[in-house]
Image (cartoon, rainbow, N blue to C red):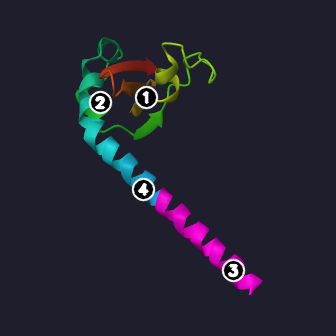
Amino acid sequence: MKAIAIVLALLAAAKIGYQEYLFRAAARDAIVGAYKEHAVQACQSEPASRSLGMTGQAWANARSVRLVIGKSSIDVYPWQVDNALWNARYRNPYLFLTASQRSGTVHCEYDILNAAAVVTRM
């Protein structure tokens, strides 16, 4: 009887975990689908993109598009909740577009809440 209870508990945990995975994957795909065109337009109009010689087609056919929550390059600690940049560091959504070029890889970071893009070469 104890073994059956353990198996049922494991099955319930697996079901909840899989449902959570499906929800998060669907939410990620919906957000990327909703904001990808905005990100492409912002990346195309960014002056750094033009100076790097990136065409509009390069951003439209980006090699990868990732949704990231929080910007790890901002120097704010989790306990500094009164800091003005805390939300940007830990809560705000960003789309990272990666486009390949002969001279290297170019990244565009699109801030969904502020509708702003930053283009960098890596």
Q: Is 60 situated left or right of 66 in this image?
A: left
| Image depth: mark 2 or mark 4 in front | 4
Q: Which mark is residue 92?
A: 1
Query: In this rendering, is residue 76 above or below 92?
Result: above
Q: Which callout, 1 or 2, points at the residue further toward the start of the chain?
A: 2
Q: Which mark is residue 39?
A: 2
Q: Which callout, 4 or 3, points at the residue further toward the start of the chain?
A: 3
Horizontal and vertical percent position of residue 102: 41, 28
State which region is magenta.
1-20
Horizontal and vertical percent position of residue 107: 43, 26
Between residue 95 and residue 105, name the one nearer to us: 95
Kindly report the distance in space between the C-alpha atoms of the residues bearing marks 2 and 3: 49 Å
State the residue position of label 3. Answer: 5
Q: Are marks 2 and 3 in contact (CB under 8 Å)?
A: no
Secondary structure mainly formed by the magenta segment: helix
Q: Are marks 1 and 2 in contact (CB under 8 Å)?
A: no
Type of residue at label 1?
Asn
Q: Are marks 2 and 4 in contact (CB under 8 Å)?
A: no
Q: Is residue 112 visible?
A: yes
Q: Are marks 1 and 3 in contact (CB under 8 Å)?
A: no
Dot 2 crowding, Cα within 10 Å, few <14, some 14–19, many 20+: many
Tell me if residue 6 is in the magenta stretch: yes
Secondary structure at numbered mark 1: loop
Q: Which callout, 2 or 3, points at the residue further toward the start of the chain?
A: 3
Secondary structure at numbered mark 3: helix
